[in-house]
Image (cartoon, rainbow, N blue to C red):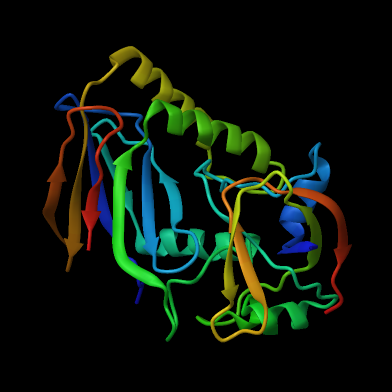
Amino acid sequence: MNLLPDFNVVCKLDGQIAADISVLVRVAMRTKNDFSIVVGATDSLGRIAVTGASLEEDVASTISMFPMDYSDIGGADSAFAGSITVHAMTMPEVESALRAYDYFSKVVIYPQNYRSKLEAGYRQLMKLAPRRMEVEIEDIVDGTLTTRISTGSSAFPAMAAAIH
Amino acid sequence: MDYYHYASATIHKLVMASKPNRVPNFDIYGTPRTVYFTDVLFTSSVAAENALLIGAKHPAGPRSSPVFRFDLDVTLCAYTNLGMVSGGTATESITADSPIVTASARLSP
């Protein structure tokens, strides 16, 4: 059983379904650094399916890479704060992610086409210059989808939808 | 005061390949992160793990051990001393900056 949930993200820019957008998932921790994980990009329906298992793999990899700097979500002494926030990546965040890719890619195996997906998202954001970025979270409970939270924002950067 | 960061082989490889040598203050997705360090010098992984509760002594269960020690120059970093690691035997400090690595050494197991 995973500690982190499976969920879908639906991304909208100015109310319109948006493809090619990457999303930043932040796993809040009570001690040390939060975990930030890029997922995506959205498909033609603006959707990304996120699995708890994939998030947990990322968490484990981050702890191994930076042994002093992260607590753990699991175990009897879990430091997981119990909330995950999700938001569509802004242009500055995509720029930072691309710089990090250039730094870490010599030793880190990123998902297939990770860089080109980020670049496609960046082009989308440049082209559309959205004033409002939204994400909807669809919970998956017993195989059934339930839209749990839909949060919008009126300005850059996008607000986050939260899972508690 | 001397300061040290205990690192994985992966980060050691990256830091030593970059000029200047610095501990990255961002994660693999480009999100800013805090760098933790201590004023206690350890020469073995197990000593660092026992005192700092990291790696094999991680409170949530065993994780990969640190493999290298970085000697840090934090002169230009704004940092905060957090005091003693809860349940451990060494003090810990944090910075949002990217400390300069002045030397590195492989830890004995």
Looking at the rendered structure, the number of numbered marks drawn on it comes to: 0
Q: Is residue A113 visible?
A: no
Asked if residue A162 lies left or right of residue B2, the reply is: left
For image coordinates 78% across by 55% down, the residue present is: B72
Residue extending furthest toward the front: B1
For image coordinates 23% across by 58% down, the residue present is: A163
User: Which residue is more in the foreground, A122 or A96?
Assistant: A96
For image coordinates 85% across by 75% down, the residue present is: B43
Asked if residue A138 lies left or right of residue B17, the reply is: left
Above or below: residue A105 compared with residue B38: above
Quadrant containing the C terminus of chain A in the rendered view: bottom left
Quadrant containing the N terminus of chain A in the rendered view: bottom left
Above or below: residue A24 compared with residue B109: above
Asked if residue A75 lies left or right of residue A13, the reply is: right
For image coordinates 38% across by 53% down, the residue present is: A26
- Image coordinates for residue A13, horizontal then vertical, percent: 22, 26
- Image coordinates for residue A135, horizontal then vertical, percent: 22, 40
State the image quarter where residue A136 is shown. Answer: top left
State the image quarter where residue A130 is shown. Answer: top left
- Image coordinates for residue A137, horizontal then vertical, percent: 20, 49
Q: Is residue A46 visible?
A: yes
State the image quarter where residue B64 is shown. Answer: bottom right
- Image coordinates for residue A149, horizontal then vertical, percent: 13, 51
Asked if residue B99 lies left or right of residue B102, the reply is: left
